[in-house]
Image (cartoon, grey):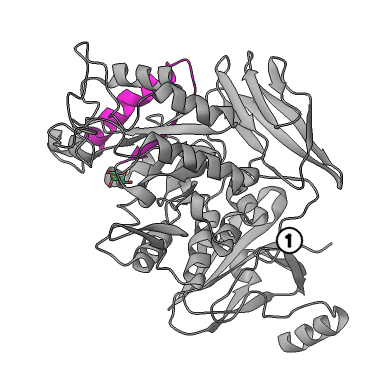
Amino acid sequence: MITLIKVILCLCLPLVVFGQAATGGDRGILTPPVSRKPRINGAKVYGVRPGHPFLYRIPATGARPMKFSARKLPKDLKLDSHTGVITGTVKKPGDYSVTLSAVNALGKAKRKFRIVAGKTLALSPPMGWSSWYMAYANIDDKLIRAEADAMISSGLADHGYSYINIDDGWNVKPGATDPAIGGEPRNADGTLKPNRNFPDMSALTAYVHEKGLKTGIYISPGTRTCGGYEGSYQHEEQDARLFAKWGFDFLKYDLCSYSKLMKDPNDSDELQKPYRLMGTILEQLNRDFVFNLCEYGRGDVWKWGSEVGGNFWRTTGDLGDPQKGLWDSVSKIGFSEAGKEQWAGPGGWNDPDNILIGHILQHDELVPTPLTHNEQYTHVTLWALLAAPMLFGGDMTQLDPFTLSLLTNDEVIDVDQDTLGKQAKPVYRSGDLQIWAKDLEGGSKAVGLFNLGESETEVTAQWSDLGLQGKQIVRDIWRQKDVGIFDNEFHASVGRHGAALMVIRASR
Ligand code: GLA
């Protein structure tokens, strides 16, 4: 009977590519080429604290020159119509409904954008880049500037990526013999010093801000960072004030050596202490800091991360642990987010770590990710469904077309950034097959079909598992194409370690 319905549907809808939506062996680029017509991308909601500096670059694709405008922008915010960068401050708390527009020679795009001036930041999962997996601690001012340039020139910023995050290795490493990083970690008054590879932090943040992008810094609450660089222990407020003075917008606070100061390194109360302290300090600063807790998921951090002021928290150890195979880590860490969904939402997200595609370090060499194409689809599909922060860990100065296509699919990004802020959960698991679903604003659902097995297999999503009934329109999000209208179920053939990502909405 079901087969009969399918046959009828196929006959009625000749364009349906039935059951083979996103299929097959190892897939190449599925994301359609970026249109030259304007499209406004990225988050639809943005949190800011009243009275603090505001900086937002409207992410828009399409041919330049482009002219930007905004209706009902809170007063005291100013939009540069050529660059699309909004600056100023929002003085009064409130929920402001703005309409953004972008016009070029080929057309016009509009998008509703809510600016919420209040306590909560990161109302959608932060998007950006982090230095760790492409350079480890071998970073300097030049590298960070080059990556910021590349976030613009590669087009990533036009899809919503905005944070340029400096990870471990920017300050002094006590005891190091290399004069570039060794020496006294603090001045006589306790002021923290960057190492010689970072001659002028304020100039660096200004360089990034000038592009309409934001920038992050990293330190440990312990005496040393994981790489052995100076930590903030007993200088927490002094360091945070310095980061604000330098102009940073984001802090990753990595437990590292703080463990040694704890009686029980897994005790949730003890773990909360340093994060609560820094969370309170950051709240009192005169600029917004997105606060990233990194303590590897100890003490069920997802249960208290928000309460101590965190905006997202790593739920596990390092995704790119060099001792482990990357596919093993991506699949283990990614799928182990199941059960933590109730703790994720606007302002506080579970973080399975950076997106490790493109050129990343493998055994100290910057080389293409060892993940196959299918595995990369699984990685990005899962992170989008999980509403995970989209922090790219690879080198933005050498993005190949395939990597770029994975990072810049705006409909996939829309799933990640959806304003409801729901984390997907598994609705079906059997052997190597898993189906995960995420409720989206407006009543549709994003559905991921995963095959963790070693050979291509058909995966069937039953409406009963998804809580759906009747005719549904299925859209293949990677291809950005409606596949057809289906009753009861949808199935796709999914390759080894691969994934398909659909958005399903009622057909009326
Ligand atoms: C830890 C963190 C990583 C990275 C390194 C830096 O391992 O989990 O994300 O920040 O430290 O040393």
Q: Residue at x 62, y 48 (%)?
A: 155
Q: Residue at x 64, y 78 (%)?
A: 491
Q: Is residue 186 left or right of residue 508?
A: left
Does the magenta-highlighted stretch encompass residue 282? yes
Q: In this view, does 238 lie to the left or right of 118?
A: left
Q: Is residue 89 above or below residue 449?
A: above
Q: Which residue is drawn at 57% across and 27% down?
A: 210
Q: Is residue 185 above or below residue 425?
A: above
Residue 321 is situated, as x and y percent measured from the top left of the image, at: 29, 57
Give the quarter the ligand 1 occupies: top left
Q: Does the residue labelled 1 lie within 8 Å of ligand 1?
A: no
Along the line of sight, the residue nearer the viewer: 339 or 294? 294
Residue 38 is situated, as x and y percent measured from the top left of the image, at: 78, 46
Q: What residue type is labelled 1?
A: Arg
Q: Which residue is drawn at 30% across and 52% down?
A: 317
Where disc 1 sits, the SS reads: strand
Which image quadrant is residue 64 in?
top right
Q: Name the residue under label 1.
A: 505
Numbered circles on residues, count: 1
Residue 338: in sight, yes or no?
Answer: no
Residue 109: in sight, yes or no?
Answer: yes
Residue 69 is situated, as x and y percent measured from the top left of the image, at: 79, 30
Within 10 Å of disc 1 (Cα), the crowding (few <14, some 14-19, many 20+) is some
Q: Quadrant of the N terminus?
A: bottom right
Q: In this view, does 61 lie to the left or right of 457?
A: right
Q: What stretch is highlighted in magenta?
A: 267-294
Residue 290 is situated, as x and y percent measured from the top left of the image, at: 46, 31
Along the line of sight, the residue nearer the viewer: 307 or 501? 501
Q: In which quarter of the image is the C terminus?
A: bottom right
Which residue ends up furthest to the top in the rendered image?
189
Which image quadrant is residue 322 in?
bottom left
